[in-house]
Amino acid sequence: MSKILCVYYSRTGKTETLMQDIAKELGCEAVKLEDGINRSGLAGWLYSGMQAMSRKVSPVNKPETALPLSEYDLVILGTPVWAGRCSAPMRSFLLQFGEELKRVAYVITRASENRYEQVFDQMDLYVPKPRERAVSIQCGTVGSSFWRDEFLAGLRDDREDT
Ligand SMILES: Cc1cc2nc3c(=O)[nH]c(=O)nc-3n(C[C@H](O)[C@H](O)[C@H](O)COP(=O)(O)O)c2cc1C
């Protein structure tokens, strides 16, 4: 049985709902990143956008997980797209702990039609091996559950092959 962990950041709950669904389907742990910064309201939105654009990060707390990060067979990272990049808390997590992740898959959520697949390549810069799977989801659209289910089916196929 594969040891899978979901790690996500979510400012307004969309990525959280999606990642909790994915974790439930896979029967695995899910942990949310926290960096102690108040990102609510317009001021929080502006600050978050500026942080994403400048690539500046604030440290995130190491999430509490049942096993050390290096012992998971797969870590699924979920983040909203901010200014065409991954969110600052996810970038911070990757900077601090990315080297510990054996295998990764990505889930990004976005508001617009643009799929922002370049974000996957940006995230790959922080981990030892490129992503195994990735999906970009425009939450609340008709296609979103289709893309989530396709991602899950791909992960299950990968697990059967290993
Ligand atoms: C600071 C900031 C920048 C954003 N930039 C983008 C963007 O460049 N493109 C996009 O499609 N959505 C953008 N969004 C929208 C979020 O990616 C989208 O609503 C996401 O699903 C929210 O996830 P959450 O509810 O988990 O925080 C941005 C949101 C914030 C707060």
Image (cartoon, helix red, strand yellow):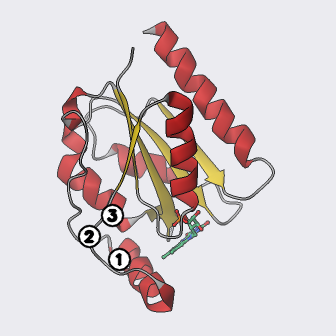
Label 1 CB less than 8 angstroms from ligand 1? no
- Residue at x 60% of width, y 61% of height: 110
Q: Nearer the viewer, mark 2 or mark 3?
A: 3
Q: Quadrant of the C terminus?
A: top left
- Residue position marked by numbered label 3 in the rendering: 89
- Residue at x 35% of width, y 81% of height: 38
- Tag 1 near tag 2, CB within 8 Å: yes
Marks 3 and 1 sit apart, C-alpha to C-alpha, by 10 Å
- Residue position marked by numbered label 2 in the rendering: 57
- Residue at x 45% of width, y 82% of height: 40
- Tag 3 near tag 1, CB within 8 Å: no
- Residue position marked by numbered label 1 in the rendering: 51
- Tag 2 near tag 3, CB within 8 Å: yes
Q: In this orientation, does residue 134 appear?
A: no
Foreground residue among 73 and 104: 73
Q: Which of marks 2 and 3 is nearer the N terminus?
A: 2
Q: In this view, does 92 lie above or below 46?
A: above
Q: Which of marks 3 and 1 is nearer the N terminus?
A: 1
Q: Is residue 28 above or below residue 85?
A: above
Marks 2 and 3 sit apart, C-alpha to C-alpha, by 7 Å
- Residue at x 51% of width, y 10% of height: 160
> Please, what secondary structure does the residue beneath circle 1 have?
helix
| Within-10-Å neighbours for mark 2: few <14, some 14–19, many 20+ | some
> Please, what secondary structure does the residue beneath circle 3 have?
helix
> Please, what secondary structure does the residue beneath circle 2 have?
loop
The three-letter amino acid code for the residue at tag 3 is Pro
